[in-house]
Every structure is written in structure tokens, then in C-alpha cells.
Amino acid sequence: MTRVLFVCGKARRRSPTAAALAAEMPGIEPDYAGLSADADERVTAEHLEWAETIVLMEKRQHARLTRLLGPAPPGKRVVCLNIPDRYDFMEPALIERLRPALKRMFG
């Protein structure tokens, strides 16, 4: 199993949607977290240690994650999907953007 952490701002829409879709893929164990202080599930160092791949929704979140918790632990794959915060949880347009990206990353 490949452990994948999806990260967005508040862990309410994009990252939980991505985790739900990834859970349908064989060999993927997903989780999600957010960077904001009021995130539903705030990202922690334990999340980063657990994950083999860290998937960010926006480029600017990489710098924010680094400021919050320091650089990703060595050997971690960090990927950015460039998906803006304009979708609702499980919104069809968000799913249409995520599915091909997940397929490219994880087959």
C-alpha cells in the first residue's frame, strides 16, 4: 500500500474529495489534512512521517507547509496538483480534475 496525504487549506473540500477518490484505487491508503488553524483536520508532523507521497492542491501551500512544519522528511514525494480553492466537496467539476491527476500519479 502507498500512503498518500492530500493537503489543502481547511481539509473540507479538495483534500477530502481527493482522499475519497484515491480510496477507490487499489494499493492506495489515503488521508487528508489542512494547513489552516481552523482546518477540520490540521496537518501535523505525524501526517508527514506517515505519508510516502504528499499531494498539495496549490503551489503556495508548499511554502506554507514548510513554514508550519519544516521541510518534508527525506525520501517523501511532494506533488502539487494546481487545483484552486473554488470547488465544493465531491463537486463533479472537482472530481473531473482529480481523477485524471490521480490516475497519472498512481495508475
Image: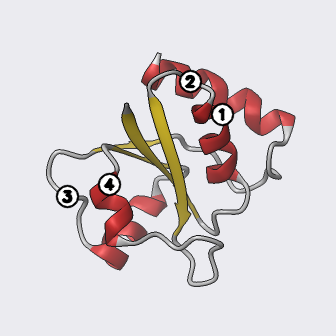
| Residue at the image point whose x is 64% and y is 69% from the top | 10
State the CA–CA distance, disc 3 to disc 1: 25 Å
Q: Badge 1 is on which residue?
A: 21
Percent position (x, y) of residue 53? 35, 42
Residue lying furthest top in this view?
107
| Residue at the image point whose x is 56% and y is 84% from the top | 37
* Mark 4 neighbour class, 10 Å CA radius: few under 14, some 14 to 19, many 20 or more: some
Which amino acid type is shown beneath numbered disc 4? Trp
State the CA–CA distance, disc 3 to disc 4: 10 Å
Q: Quadrant of residue 44?
A: bottom left
In the rendered structure, which disc, 4 or 2, sits on the residue that comes first in sequence? 2
The disc at residue 5 is none
Q: Nearer the viewer, residue 48 or 97?
A: 48
The disc at residue 50 is 4
State the CA–CA distance, disc 4 to disc 2: 19 Å
| Residue at the image point whose x is 64% and y is 82% from the top | 38
In the rendered structure, which disc, 4 or 1, sits on the residue that comes first in sequence? 1
| Residue at the image point whose x is 52% and y is 73% from the top | 42
In the rendered structure, which disc, 3 or 4, sits on the residue that comes first in sequence? 4
Q: Is residue 58 above or below residue 93?
A: below
Q: Secondary structure at mark 2?
A: loop
Specify the color scheme: secondary structure
